[in-house]
Image (spheres, grey):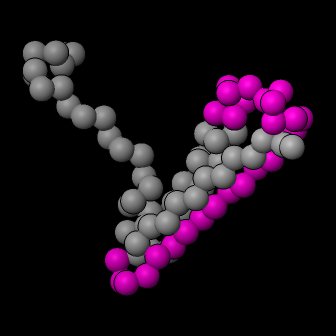
Amino acid sequence: MRARVVFRKQVSDGNYGTEAAEVSMELGGDVYDTTEEAIALALEQARRLVHEELGRSPAWRVRDAVKPELPEAPEDLEELPL
């Protein structure tokens, strides 16, 4: 038995439709010999591939939904570097 990771994302296009992308990866070796780190790395790669594909969508709402989030501003403005 082999370890497998799947990442799927479905996003509304804003016109009563959706666009989806999915990546499925089988990792080499036996599932019991696969480390959590190897599984996490494969899942990270699958997530990146799905987001990149949806980021090329012709629908701007789909592209906007998968763009990286901006970091939140600190509540205490004195923490901001000058």
Q: Residue furthest right?
A: 29
Which of the pair 74/41 is nearer the observer? 41
Quarter containing the C terminus:
top left
Rendering coords of residue 12 (x, y %): 40, 72
Q: Which range of residues does the magenta coloring cover?
A: 14-41
Q: Residue at x 43, y 82 (%)?
A: 17
Q: Is residue 80 magenta?
A: no
Q: Residue at x 46, y 76 (%)?
A: 18
Rendering coords of residue 68 (x, y %): 42, 46
Which of the pair 62/22 is nearer the observer? 22
Q: Is residue 26 magenta?
A: yes
Q: Which quarter of the figure has residue 65?
A: bottom left
Q: Is residue 75 above or below residue 25?
A: above
Quarter containing the N terminus:
top right
Residue 76 visible somewhere in the drawing: yes
Left or right of residue 29, residue 52 in this image: left
Q: Residue at x 69, y 34 (%)?
A: 39
Q: Is residue 70 above or below residue 51?
A: above
Residue 52 visible somewhere in the drawing: no
Q: Which quarter of the figure has residue 60?
A: bottom left
